[in-house]
Amino acid sequence: MDTVRGASAPDIEDILTAWAVSMPYDPVSRSALEAFLSNPRYCQTGSAAVAEKDGEAVGFAAGIAAEENAGWIPVFFVRPDLAGGRLADDLLDFVLEYLKRRGVTYVRAEPFEWSEARFFTGIDSRYSHILDILERRGFVRTDESQVDIVKDLRDFRPADDVAAARLSLEREGFTFTLCDEVTRRPYLEFLDKYFERYQGWRIGIRRQLEAGDLARHTLALLSGEVVGFCAFDKETDWYIWASGVREDLRLKGIGTILVYLALEEITRRGAERMLVSDCPIEFYKILNGRIERHYVMLGRKLGGAL
Ligand SMILES: CC(C)(COP(=O)(O)OP(=O)(O)OC[C@H]1O[C@@H](n2cnc3c(N)ncnc32)[C@H](O)[C@@H]1OP(=O)(O)O)[C@@H](O)C(=O)NCCC(=O)NCCS
């Protein structure tokens, strides 16, 4: 028999099994799933659902009603062979009904902040069956520019044109440097003032600076004020996870110089490759790296009948 029902902690084992079958490009750990299901910011009664076929879990979905009128579906999957059927629609409807009850009028199928709820970094374009369901149910593609890039650093040399651009900006009074004890505070003030909307970044950067390795951030300064940054870190591999430039100073090459300075530092620390995940290709094309994954973001209005 096919059923869709609310998901809770005792379902973790079944969800992990179904996840491994249906989401091969997005492995999830038990601890991440546990953290998700037990965090009231992401999961509330009726916000996450399991789809079952003959008693076996074959799908999982969750909705987050985070802001006034705005909701997210940070995860949604069913076994590929069931994507064309009623069960997939019922699973999606379960979550959409929840979001509607919470007053959501626009829902996004895309990552929710930079948080533990970030199972998808958008929907990998290879999950065509998931995209089919969402599009069949009225979602439209809002962004297809997000990619994961791998940059091989084995023969890395700073590019000549980047070095020339840096010299020219330095003549205008800009400086480019690794973050240190002196620049740490102006850096945080810059983020609070100019990147107020990027709450996930501000929290993540503050945490990283508190953890101590300040030199995992490159900074651009003008007259002693921070005007741009690039933040990088290491898990298994080194990766760049955020970069930003003050809006009135964009498209002058500052972002590129900050990213290349980060690459120099990452190479100096012995890395042979570096990743950028879930990033806009329009900017990170500057890396000249290998594109590993493409993502699709989708959204739809919610109101009336589903
Ligand atoms: C992305 C960002 C850091 C770029 O900084 P910048 O100093 O303007 O970047 P650069 O001047 O070095 O631009 C490098 C290239 O990227 C392109 N580019 C930069 N931002 C772009 C954008 N928003 N859309 C399209 N292309 C863009 C530039 O045209 C340039 O390409 P070109 O060399 O072919 O002319 C800046 O726009 C920003 O802070 N954006 C908001 C935060 C963000 O989205 N960060 C990226 C995700 S981590």
Image (cartoon, rainbow, N blue to C red):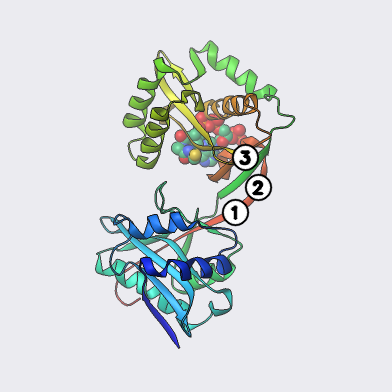
Q: Is residue 256 above or below residue 282?
A: above
Disc 2 to disc 3, C-alpha distance? 9 Å
Can residue 180 be seen from the camera position used here?
Answer: yes
| Total number of numbered discs in the rendering | 3
Looking at the figure, which quarter contains the N terminus?
Answer: bottom left
Q: Which mark is residue 285?
A: 3
Image quadrant in which you'd find residue 5 = bottom left
Image quadrant in which you'd find residue 301 = bottom left
In the image, 143 versus 4, the foreground residue is: 4
The percent position of residue 24, horizontal first and vertical second, equals 60, 62
Q: Which mark is residue 205?
A: none
Queried on whether the Cβ of the residue with tag 3 lies below 8 angstroms from ligand 1, the answer reads: yes
Looking at the figure, which quarter contains the C terminus?
Answer: bottom left
For residue 17, side relative to residue 89 (left or right): right
* Contact flag, marks 2 and 1 (Cβ < 8 Å): yes
How many other residues sit within 10 Å of disc 1, few (<14), some (14-19) or many (≥20)?
Answer: many
Select label 2 or label 3 by which is in front. 2
- Name the residue at the right extreme: 155
Q: Which residue is mark 2?
A: 291
Q: Which residue is mark 1?
A: 294
Q: Please tell me which of labels 3 and 1 falls first in the chain.
A: 3
Q: Is residue 30 above or below residue 5?
A: above
Specify the amino acid type for callout 3.
Answer: Lys
Disc 3 to disc 1, C-alpha distance? 13 Å
Specify the amino acid type for callout 2.
Answer: Ile
